[in-house]
Amino acid sequence: MSHFQDYKTAFEKQRAKIQIPADCTAKPPQYRLPPGDLVDPRGWDFSWWLTFKDRYYVVCHEIWSYRPGKEPTRDYLSFHYGPITHVDANGKIDRNPNNPLVLRICKSTKSCEPPHLHFLKPHPAPHYDQGRVEGLVLEDTNMLQFVKAVFRARAEKIGMPEAMGFTLR
């Protein structure tokens, strides 16, 4: 079995265990494979969108690469929670990094950007790198951990730092 199939199977099992709140719509996750070998793809692109009735949304996006004989590498991640500011004529949410947000955790190896987070203010600042974040290893954060924290923050009316267990310096 390919690493992609392992990833997809593990995600689907974990997603099935999540209780989606009544005010939330979770769209089916999207998996995109590059053209070519579908048996053992050399990478994949994943995104999952959740929207709330109060016009907030979560998007989890990851890009993975894989070389035979090695473990897959998560080259890009963006876990974003914030208000919907614009929807295009096709109903697609504008995903501009300058949009207002509650929390975004992101990383891109292609642009040599180490894991960091943005809290309450969009790109480019403030830009909290791992040295300014205590209680959470940004590189190890996964999308289901992030989504569950959003659900908890909304249900308990607490902040995302408390829901995710981190503090900022």
Image (tube, rainbow, N blue to C red):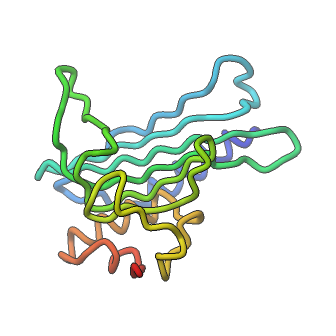
Q: Is residue 121 left or right of residue 148?
A: left
Work out whether 86 lies above or below 116: above
Is 39 in front, or is 157? 157
Q: Residue furthest left?
A: 54
Residue drawn at 26 percent across, 63 percent down: 120
- The residue under the point 63% across, 49% down is 74
Tell me what residue is drawn at x 44 percent, y 59 percent: 105
- Would residue 61 appear left or right of 81 to someone viewing this image? right
Q: Position of residue 58 (x, y in %)?
A: 31, 51
**Residue at the spot 26% in from the left edge and 34% down from the top edge:** 94
Query: Percent position (x, y) of residue 23?
Result: 16, 54
Q: Quadrant of the C terminus?
A: bottom left
Across the whole image, how many numbered discs are drawn on residues?
0
Question: Could you tell whether 7 is left or right of 89 in the image?
Answer: right
In the picture shown, does residue 83 fall above or below 116?
A: above
Closer to us: 160 or 148: 160
- Location of residue 156 by image quarter: bottom left
Above or below, 137 relative to 55: below
Q: Position of residue 59 (x, y in %)?
A: 36, 47
In this view, the residue farthest toward the right is 69
